Image (spheres, coloured by chain):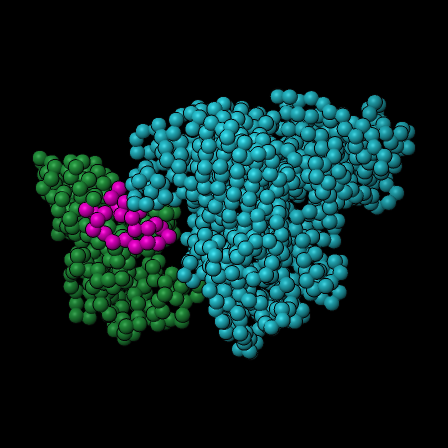
Chain colours: A green, B cyan
Amino acid sequence: MIPEQFGYSAPSSLGEALSLLQEHGEDAKVLAGGHSLIPMMKLRFAAPTHLVDINNVPGMSYINEEDGKLKIGALAREVDLEDSELIRSKFPIFIDASKLIADPQVRNFGTVGGNIAHGDAANDHPAVMLALNAEVEITGPEGKRTVPIDEFFYGFYMTAVQQGEILTEISIPLPEGKFGCAYHKLERKVGDYATAGVAVALTVDESGTCTSAGIGLTNVNPVPLRASRSEEALVGSKLTDEDIARAAQFAAEDCSPSDDLRGDEDYKRHVVKVLTKRMIKKAIDRI
Amino acid sequence: MDKRKEIFPHGIPGHNLGEIEREIPNDEPPAWPINDKLKVVGKRIRRNDALAKVTGSAKYTSDIQLPGMLYAKMLRANVPHAKILSIDTSKAERHPGVRAVHVFTSDDEGSKYQDVKYAGQPLAGVAADSLDIAKEAVALIEVEYETMPFVIDTEEAMKEGAPLVYEEPIGEQTDGGDVGVTHDGSEGKGNLRGPTTSSFLGGARGDLDQGFSEADVILDRTYRTQVHTHVPLETHGVVIDWKPDQMTVYASTQSTKGVRDGLASYFDLPKNKVRVICEFMGGGFGAKHSAGTFGPMAAELSRKSGRPVWLMLDRKEEHIAEGNRPNSIHHLKIGAKKDGTLTAIQQKSHGTAGVALGAGVGRIAQGLYTCPNFSTEQYDVLTHAGPGAAWRAPGNVQGAYGLEQAIDEIADMLKTDPLVLREKIDPSEVRKVLRQRGAKSFGWKYRPPGSDTGRIKKGIGVAQSTWPRFVNLDSTVEVKMYSDGTVEVRSGVQDIGTGTKTILAQVVAEELGLKAEDITVRIGDTIFPDAPGSGGSIVTGAITPPARNAAYLVKQKLFNQVAPQLETEPSMLTVSDGMIMHKEDASKKISMRDALRRMRTGQIEASASRSDDYGGFQQPWGLAYGDLGSVQFAEVSVDTETGFVKVERITAAHSCGRPLNISQIESQVNGGVIQGVSYALYESRVMDNKTGHMMNANVDQYRMPYAKEIPDIDIVLVEEYSARSSTDAYGIGEPANIATAAAVANAVYNAIGVRLYEIPMTPASILKALNKVEQ
């Protein structure tokens, strides 16, 4: 439970942080909330030689509405989501997710940006971001670039954030028309990673026809998974029980969970089906 | 010894309370009336160590700090079966801060080291200036193994040609309590040992063929339970200071005497050269009766270094090496007539206690119900896994899980309320009352299995248990009164956490007309008189009678001194509310405090040992079979989409003779029920059959219940007087745990209409049973 030795810097600007990352090369890691990184270091699954702590970089903890988008700064913490009136009124899916992440101590410090940048399909925000069609802003020595969430997750612990870069902002298009969203994960016990989790975001038109659907799955695939066939099954439908059941069935078929102490593959597929159905209905209820 | 006759209360208040005449030793006190006439006994008395525990001033074994103390860590085998070719400790010995290294060797001819029989077996140990240094040094020890084939899975181990755990006969398991086996392990074939075919209740009886031919319905089933490891808050461990004149051992133990005798025997020391102290105990469920291997290791390291050595196990070591509740594959064939009468019970079981013995399924099927034709065969299956040990009602929990579901299934076949069937076949008068009062409190109203509708289905279930009245005669208590008014109780008995310290104060206070807080209780030290280990739910029934009797004797001594001062005879004196007074003349009185101040000596004392039960034992070594059982009722809800089971509430109806402290009894029942729920739904040792390692040796993946998963627990306590001793009280630690898993299993069946036959009942296994997920 004791990490390998490492160096530590706490820059006070983004520029300084970037040059430190440049200086220390591939063995440097960015430290935000630290609630994924530090446990991995303690278990010696990770042994970075230098940590660049960005907590002192000002102006990165915002949650606001700008240019028709919800913007979340990389240092916004889980607890900030829970406290945000904007989130509460327009994106209750974040409250659903945040409430299920670990415990209050972790949520007081863990960041939304870190939850995504860790590149772990067991984390909860990746599925939520997939459902909401987020875009991720990444800042590097060359400046800023924006990556759609579908192109963000590369593999196990691998993301579009390259060496020397920092995830700086997440932006989510504000929904047009009638919108509903919901997230839930089934946990083996409180605070555990998901046995399986499902995020759903829907818009419907005046006639009740589904005009867009986003469905993301947690911890049932090597990388966070968009349930595309399920989305397609919903768009253009009237969201009848039959439509919902079909979408749920597709999600169960299209994921590829692995056996572990949380359950075997068949069980997890079943859980995905049940949760997809429940979250679609919950999202509809919230429209 | 001279005896006299006394009249005792006998029976159950509100049901059949009467009186019985018993012949008792002359030096024991007259009968107490039933509890509502007593002042301290039978009340909700606060634990006398509560303040010390909640403020942190209580020092547990791991808190012990001695001058010059070293910290030790053991090296454990990382393969499940091997011969050890060499152990090289040279790098560890040279590591800065290391003060002693010890390697376990073998006395066997031909090999220097003991063969490895399970992954986690201790091989060597290091004592160093800090725990970190000891851990670093352990990592520097180099072991060369010659690995051998191994077998982890119980059914694989039973097959012919499976890798053998032992080539030779093995001895009986010694670690504690009433283990669920009576054979000595010498007979058997391959990895099988046994069978056990009898218990103190007898052996096979009647004629099975005849019994089955008389049956209208026959049930033939196999029930399976998992390996359940020990997770007390405090792990096993010791601090040992071996000085030339005495080895002092601070131990987290259920038996100070057991640890003393074990270490004295291991090192060939006189018993009085080993002193074992356990003032506060962080819990144990049966596996903490001996010095284990860590005890001798710490002693060797202390001897080599000449310093005190601290050796507490970590959670992983606790899981893999310090005992577990063996699994069971429990086959029951039961015949019954249409009216419910049982005609035959045939029981056959297999289970593994890893490299140890003790995997029987107890006496529940033999003793709970009337059935003229019975036979049992209980086998131990040896596997290359950590040793089993006694675990809260050894064997009986596994046994009840099978039998009490079988009885439910028979009720189903006969289309009758399972509670009504039990009324028909259960001869016990106590359980009749437990069923009546329990059912009323629970609101039992039978509903057919699977009759609830909707996504979340609710169900109810009931299960029963029985437990013997074990007594250990090696139970001695000394009571001293000092001239300053102090009263002190002394015994070697340890308080495992159940509240032994408090009930000793209560019985002595009641006898002396004082308050419980007036009594100082000094226990958990082998310099005091010997007392039994905390196993078999023995302690309350064994130690409280001599405590009361010693108080009675010391009171007589005081009366002898006081009587002349009050110008009366000692026999005319009595005590009440801190006063000694004449039974008939209220003007003749003196406070206890003044009487003690005027004593001729600074202190008076008396000691007493447990006498035979009034009315005699059924077994000469100290057993009166009886119904210290329970009837537990469960209500569950099952989410048929996710497979999650929530135990909503449990009504636990119990009897334990004369209740001594209602709050402490309730604590035991709460704990027993919670552990039972956990056994039914969550806890399970997961082994990797490919490597032989335990995969969930921590408290994250080894699933245990969380606060919101604890049911509402409603306790119905039935007073029952049997006039067997001067306190007529018994323990309840084990009975509290026996019936719960079966009651929960029956309730799950009642909810969903499908039975699982195996615990833990995980969400995945529930969905499989419902055919929602592929088998």
Q: Which residue occupies the foreground of this view, B387 or A129?
A: B387
Residue B653, placed above or below residue A115: above
The tally of labels here is: 0
Instruction: Please identify the quarter of the rendering in which residue A146 is found.
Output: bottom left
Task: Look at the image and say whether residue A268 sits in the magenta stretch.
Answer: yes
Residue B151 in view (yes/no): yes
Depth check: A103 or B246 in front? B246
Identify the residue at horizontal 42%, vertical 40% (top origin).
B757
Residue B268: image location, x then y, percent? 72, 63
| Residue A146 shown left or right of residue A106 in the figure | left
Q: Quadrant of the C terminus of chain B?
A: top left
| A156 relative position to B401: left or right | left
* Image point (64%, 63%), residue name: B296
Looking at the picture, tell me which residue is in the foreground, A267 or B502. A267
- Toward which corner of the image does residue B269 lie, by quadrant? bottom right
| Horizontal and vertical percent position of residue B97 | 56, 74
Nearest to the observer: residue B382 or residue B258: B382
Residue at the image point whose x is 77% and y is 44% from the top: B478
Q: Main secondary structure of the magenta part?
A: helix
Residue A61 picture location, percent across and down: 26, 56
**Left or right: B33, with B451 as reference point:** right
Question: Can residue B364 be seen by looking at this rendering?
Answer: no
For the point 27% across and 74% down, which residue is it? A25
Q: Is residue B736 above or below residue B244?
A: above
Residue B137 among magenta residues: no
Residue A178 point in image, percent of width and height = 14, 39
Q: Which residues are magenta?
A: A250-274
